[in-house]
Amino acid sequence: MNMPALNSNRVFEGNPWAWAAFLALTVLPGCKQPAEVDCQPEGYFRLVEPERKAGAAPFGIDRLGTRVNEPLAFMPAMVIFKERNRPVVSWISYGHSTFDVTYIYSPEEGLARNSRNPDDVLPMKWLSDERLLLGFQSQICLDGKAGVHRCMFGDYSQDERPFAADMTCWARPQLYYPTD
C-alpha cells in the first residue's frame, strides 16, 4: 500500500496540542533560568542633597530631583548583570557609544566598584526586582535647547555634577545547548 507523503505544514494544522508537544520537546529543554538581567534608563535625574547618606559612595542617590532634559556629556546607556554582583555598564560619551566597564556590586555598601580601578565608585541601589538606580557624574550642556549632537565640547559645564539613572530591568532568558 502506498502511503501519501507527509506534508509537515499539515501536521500542526488545527491541532493546538501538536504545537504544545512540539514546543515542549524542542524549545523548553533548551531553556534554563535567566542568567542575565538587562537594565535601560527610563530617565536621568538631578539629585537633591547628594551629600547626604553617601556612606562609602562619593554621593547619595536616595532623593531624586527633577528630570534632566539637557544633554549630558557622559551617561550610562545600559547595565547588564551577567552575575548578580557583576554589572557591566555601557557608557555614552557626547552622544556616542564608547565603552563598557565591569563593576563589582556590593548591595551592603550600595555601590559598584570598577573591577580594574577600585577608586572608580558608583552609587547603585535596587529599588525592586525591575528597577535600579545608578549614580554617575557628568557635565551638563549649558545650552538647554541644543540637542545631543549640537552641544559642542565647549558648551558643557566645567564641573561634573551628580546624577542618577532610573532604570527598568528585565531578565533575559539564556538558551542552554547540552554538549553531551
Image (cartoon, grey):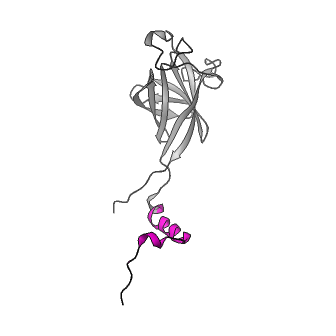
Q: Which residue occupies 47% across, 68% down?
A: 22
> Observer-nearest residue: 99 or 122?
99
Magenta stretch prevailing secondary structure: helix
Relative height, residue 5 to residue 172 (above, below): below
Q: Give the quarter of the image for residue 60.
A: top right
Q: How many marks?
A: 0
Q: Which residues are magenta?
A: 5-28
- In reply to whether residue 21 is colored magenta, the answer given is yes
Q: Quadrant of the N terminus?
A: bottom left
User: Would residue 98 appear left or right of 105 to someone viewing this image?
Assistant: left
- In reply to whether residue 97 is colored magenta, the answer given is no
Q: Quadrant of the C terminus?
A: bottom left
Q: Position of residue 41 (x, y in %)?
A: 55, 32
> Observer-nearest residue: 23 or 161?
23
Q: Position of residue 74 (x, y in %)?
A: 47, 21
Q: Which residue occupies 45% across, 26% down?
A: 92
User: Would residue 70 appear left or right of 176 to someone viewing this image?
Assistant: right
Q: Position of residue 130 (x, y in %)?
A: 59, 41
Relative height, residue 22 to residue 166 (above, below): below
Residue lying furthest bottom in this view? 1
Q: Position of residue 155 (x, y in %)?
A: 48, 10
Relative height, residue 143 to residue 4 (above, below): above
Relative height, residue 66 to residue 85 (above, below): above
Q: Which residue occupies 47% across, 28% down?
A: 113
Residue lying furthest left in this view? 180
Q: Which residue occupies 46% across, 67% down?
A: 25
